[in-house]
Image (cartoon, rainbow, N blue to C red):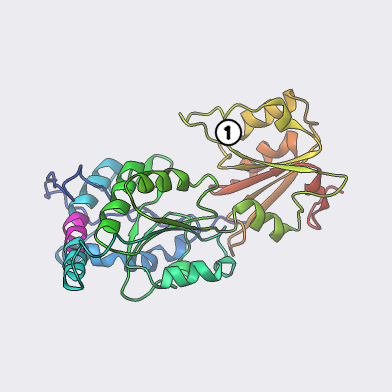
Amino acid sequence: MALVSRIPSISPYSGATQLRKIKSFGLNPIFCINYASSPFTEKHSIERYQRDSWIYKNELEQSGSCPILPDPSYVRDYDIALQLPELNKMLQVLKEKREGEGGCDKRGPGNVFLVGTGPGDPELLTVKALRVIQNADLLLYDRLVSNEVLELVGPDAKLLYVGKTAGYHSRTQEEIHQLLLSFAEAGANVVRLKGGDPLVFGRGGEEMDFLQQKGIQVKVIPGITAASGISAELGIPLTYRGVANTVRFLTGHSRKGGTDPLFVAENAADPDSTLVVYMGLSTLPSLASKLIHHGLPTDTPAVAIERGTTPQQRVVFAELKNLAHEIISHRLESPTLIITGKVVALSPLWPLC
């Protein structure tokens, strides 16, 4: 099957433009959006980022071309120069609105909602998530949030891309914290949109802890995590009486990065358990080797799912010993979820029964 075509990352950068250091919110500079495509919506990335055009409006009107820059650091630094004035303007409008409605002293800060959008299919959104999305003032969204979800945002809300991908972070985690804090303190209803569930490998716990320490009320609206949504799509029961009595979620990336996954304890190789690996494409060869070393049979059924629950979903089934090779052969790309365990063979799609 052919890969979905990609739109290259672009920026309205002009070589003659000199970057300037800009202060924002009285804090360190906050860096922002690159026209980086979402892995779910490459063919529609331009339409997707039209919702962010409030930031680029003046610059795009003055620029006749959008050359591709070889160095992402230039893209990131230039994007901050474009966005910061508009973000500051929005903050000022919110503060003046609060003062006109009774003053900051009489009203507390706004709310921050950490909202999970599920594995990709917009119909897997919860009713509560939909209501919050439609009533937000500002939404900060990740790279795994689909166009279909963004189209549900209210017409007066502002969207800001804060996604991360390997080798490029449109914003650091600390900058995201400061954005959430600044706008919540101004009285805005701020929604942090995350793929899957905010508290499952989504760093939602860090954002919640930071804001609560600053006196900001945080409400978490769970989403269907990729393990549940994708396994249901494939007809794989994560647990099954007499086959798998436990399920474990594992991140394929260590905190310090690199090619070696997080330490895999011996009980993670339990043949009577289901193991789900998030973000494990690059580390799968090492991970599979460790699992086999710890006793997981080499013929354990396994599956890798790229962009699960979306129209672009691609699936590769294989025994554990062959899965890494099959992933390379089929050129799967991130985001790809990996499930191993005897329950995989219960899927009606399992080809090796």
Is 86 magenta? The answer is yes
From the viewer's perspective, is 271 left or right of 65? right
Q: Is residue 201 above or below residue 295?
A: below
- Disc 1 residue crowd, few under 14, some 14–19, many 20+, Cα 10 Å: some
For the point 22% across and 62% down, the residue is 56
Magenta segment: 82-90
Residue furthest to the bottom: 155
Residue 165 figure quarter: top left
Q: Residue at x 58, y 61 (%)?
A: 312
Q: Is residue 47 left or right of residue 315?
A: left
Q: What's under tag 1, amino acid-wise?
A: Thr
Q: Nearer the viewer, residue 95 or 309?
A: 95
Give the residue at x 70% y 39%.
Answer: 323
Find residue 339 and report its horizontal and vertical position in percent: 69, 45
Q: Secondary structure at mark 1?
A: loop
State the image coordinates of residue 147 (x, y, percent, origin top left): 45, 66
Name the residue: 78% across, 56% down.
349
**What secondary structure prevails in the magenta region?**
helix
Instruction: Find residue 232 and report its image quarter.
Output: bottom right
Task: List the residue tagged with mark 1.
Answer: 283
